[in-house]
Image (spheres, helix red, strand yellow):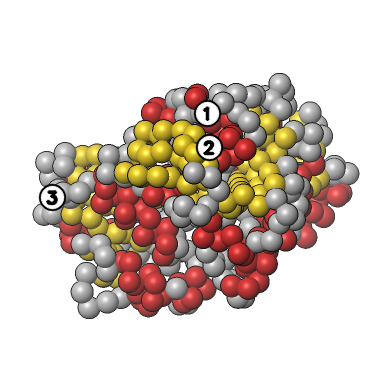
């Protein structure tokens, strides 16, 4: 079939394009003329896309149109109906297209993309597996019988999915522009859980979801699956237990408590489904970096990291990882907030964690609003800046530093601008 994706550069849409291409379909699309990191994956796969403008014309020979969430507007839908082409919104198409595969949906406030990647790399050691990950990476294949995918809670988009198993990494109030209270947010996950036969959930959030087949994993030894003697100083090292029985020793060069929990969720799923755990983590020593999750560029003694963190707890997790990885470095936050509603709701939490950095710079708010991120300005260690030149001047003579660039949006120009300026000083 010939699929046409409207909004093809979206993180989920680009991943879906990759899956469809691997499945043997012809894939093309259209999107706004704006640089997005997912373009690299589309170009690598030779997937063609056009610029969405007044001169854009839909190809006549397409068989099916898939529409990204941000393009579900009257003018787009009306035009597709005029062409008499079948269409579905992104999440509705996923629910339909992958219906015959064994589905593992990865959801939760934080860590969905990373956990999806871990599950794919673990499952492919046993079964032919397709993957749709929220960093633009999609892997398909007609012979595959498992499908692991990222299921986002925003605007309840995931409620159309009916997977065999749901993995809930954590539930931490977010998307405050849509969910008006913690109760409403928690209720959304509870509704989604009812769509699956089995649910694995972080032990700390077990009371937020009610399900007849609920399996827990976490740090607490009361969880069904837990780590014992966990050491995070040189990666993730420890023993995984199931109800007081050691089932697997883990030693992987991946940093951070949350990454340990993501791996624990994978091992819990595999053990529960009677997979032999001996080869569960084969290849994890060379697992490729999840895009925009602590991606590093090193220049002399400075490290430049691109990270997706945009919630206070995500920033804390990233800082904790960096402190473990670079214990002798000065660590600087460069944070670009995305939504004003999130900034207002969590301003105290944002300020608290940013003060834990050696220095923090707040960039202009991404969202088009008359408000700005000045809410986070503090007298010490936190500065509000609005140009790259200011940032370069502030950091010109600083050495032995980890620069942690954080935003849910593209922040490449700031990262490479500062990195280039520092490179010239060595």
Which of the two discs, 2 and 3, sits closer to the camera? 2
Above or below — where is 399 with respect to 17?
A: below
Label 2 with label 1: CB-CB less than 8 Å:
yes
Residue drawn where x is 35% and y is 38% of the image: 237
Residue drawn where x is 20% and y is 62% of the image: 358
Gap in angstroms between the C-alphas marked 1 and 3 = 44 Å
* Circle 1 Cα neighbour tier, 10 Å, few/some/many (<14 / 14–19 / ≥20): some
Residue drawn where x is 37% and y is 33% of the image: 251
The residue wearing badge 1 is 277
Q: Residue 306 vs residue 45: left or right?
A: left
* Circle 2 Cα neighbour tier, 10 Å, few/some/many (<14 / 14–19 / ≥20): many
Task: Kindly state the secondary structure of the residue where label 3 is placed.
Answer: loop
The residue wearing badge 3 is 399
Upstream in sequence: badge 2 or badge 1? 2
Upstream in sequence: badge 1 or badge 3? 1
The quarter of the image holding the N terminus is: top right
Which of the two discs, 1 and 3, sits closer to the camera? 1
What label does residue 323 carry, if any?
Answer: none
Residue drawn where x is 49% and y is 25% of the image: 278
Residue 5, image x, y percentages: 69, 41
């Amino acid at each position: 079939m010939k699929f046409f994706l409207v909004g093809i550069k979206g993180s989920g849409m680009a991943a879906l394009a990759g899956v469809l291409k691997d499945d043997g379909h012809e894939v093309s699309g259209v999107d706004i003329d704006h640089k997005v990191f997912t373009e690299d994956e589309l170009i690598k796969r030779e997937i063609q896309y056009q610029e969405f403008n007044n001169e854009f014309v839909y190809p006549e020979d397409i068989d099916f149109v898939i529409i990204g969430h941000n393009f579900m507007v009257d003018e787009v839908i009306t035009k597709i109906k005029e062409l008499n082409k079948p269409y579905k919104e992104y999440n509705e198409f996923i629910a339909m297209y992958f219906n015959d595969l064994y589905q593992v949906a990865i959801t939760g406030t934080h860590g969905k993309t990373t956990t999806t990647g871990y599950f794919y790399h673990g499952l492919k050691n046993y079964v032919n597996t397709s993957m749709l990950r929220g960093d633009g990476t999609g892997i398909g294949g007609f012979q595959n019988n498992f499908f692991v995918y990222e299921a986002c809670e925003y605007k309840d988009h995931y409620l159309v999915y009916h997977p065999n198993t749901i993995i809930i990494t954590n539930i931490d109030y977010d998307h405050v522009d849509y969910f008006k209270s913690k109760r409403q947010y928690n209720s959304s996950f509870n509704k989604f859980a009812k769509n699956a036969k089995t649910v694995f959930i972080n032990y700390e959030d077990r009371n937020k979801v009610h399900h007849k087949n609920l399996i827990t994993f976490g740090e607490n030894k009361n969880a069904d699956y837990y780590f014992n003697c966990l050491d995070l100083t040189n990666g993730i090292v420890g023993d995984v237990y199931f109800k007081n029985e050691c089932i697997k020793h883990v030693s992987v060069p991946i940093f951070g408590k949350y990454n340990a929990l993501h791996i624990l969720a994978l091992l819990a799923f595999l053990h529960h489904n009677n997979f032999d755990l001996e080869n569960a983590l084969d290849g994890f020593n060379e697992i490729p970096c999840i895009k925009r999750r602590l991606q590093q560029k090193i220049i002399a003694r400075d490290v430049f990291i691109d990270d997706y963190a945009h919630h206070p707890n995500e920033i804390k997790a990233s800082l904790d990882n960096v402190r473990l990885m670079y214990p002798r470095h000065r660590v600087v936050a460069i944070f670009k907030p995305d939504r004003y509603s999130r900034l207002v709701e969590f301003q105290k939490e944002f300020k608290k964690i940013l003060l834990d950095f050696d220095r923090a710079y707040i960039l202009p708010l991404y969202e088009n609003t008359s408000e700005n991120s000045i809410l986070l300005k503090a007298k010490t260690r936190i500065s509000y800046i609005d140009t790259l030149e200011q940032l370069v001047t502030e950091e010109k003579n600083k050495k032995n530093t980890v620069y942690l660039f954080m935003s849910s949006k593209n922040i490449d120009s700031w990262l490479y601008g500062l990195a280039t300026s520092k490179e010239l000083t060595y």
